[in-house]
Image: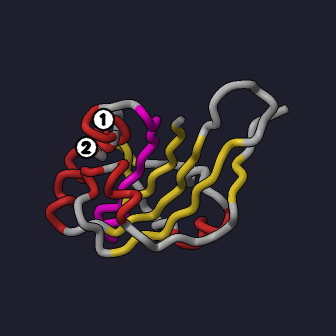
Amino acid sequence: MIAQKEGSGELRTDAQPLITRFPLIGQPESVAWYSGTMSGDAPGPSTYWIDAVITVTPDVGDRLAALATQPVLTAPDVVEDLTTQLPRELMTGPDLGPALTKDGEHDFWVTAYYSPSSRQLVITALGE
């Protein structure tokens, strides 16, 4: 069985849980995100997922832009309800996702994309 994202389907707009997990985002201007657990029959702890689109402040945007050095050719794999909020032009880089993990901890594995024109950060994260 292939693991799939499961969740309540509730759009969340509260920033604090994201700020706690990904402190580099600072105090975002807006957030839209979904979360849940991965389905599957494997024993052990649950794997949690987060898909988010975050509009950051200009100073945070400058830091993210410095880490996002490569154009993205395919849209990020986020839950369907979030696809309409994805920015059109995204950049990524090998240091962008790891920079977002909490104080260098790896409690979440993060893939991140950034749009300098809209100052929107897209995060797809998995963690225990």
Residue topped by disc 2: 67
For the magenta stretch, what is the residue range?
A: 107-120
Relative side of 73 to 118, left or right = right
Residue topped by disc 1: 95
Local secondary structure at mark 1? loop
The quadrant where residue 40 appears: top right
Q: Are discs 2 and 1 less than 8 Å apart at CB? A: yes
Residue at 57%, 47% in the rendered image: 49
Q: Amino acid at mark 2?
A: Leu
Residue at 37%, 48% in the rendered image: 21
Relative side of 115 to 48, left or right = left
**Rendered location of residue 53, percent (x, y):** 45, 64
Residue 109 on the magenta segment: yes
Residue 102 on the magenta segment: no
Q: Earlier in the sequence, mark 2 or mark 1?
A: 2
Name above or below for residue 43 compared with residue 56: above
Q: Residues within 10 Å of mark 1 (few under 14, many from 20)?
A: some
Local secondary structure at mark 2? helix
Q: Nearer the viewer, residue 108 or 97?
A: 108
Question: Which residue occupies the extreme top position in the image?
Answer: 43
**Rendered location of residue 15, percent (x, y):** 37, 67
**Rendered location of residue 123, percent (x, y):** 45, 52
Residue at 43%, 34% in the rendered image: 107
Relative side of 18 to 47, left or right = left
Question: Which residue occupies the extreme right position in the image?
Answer: 1
User: How would you classify the magenta stretch by its main secondary structure?
Assistant: strand
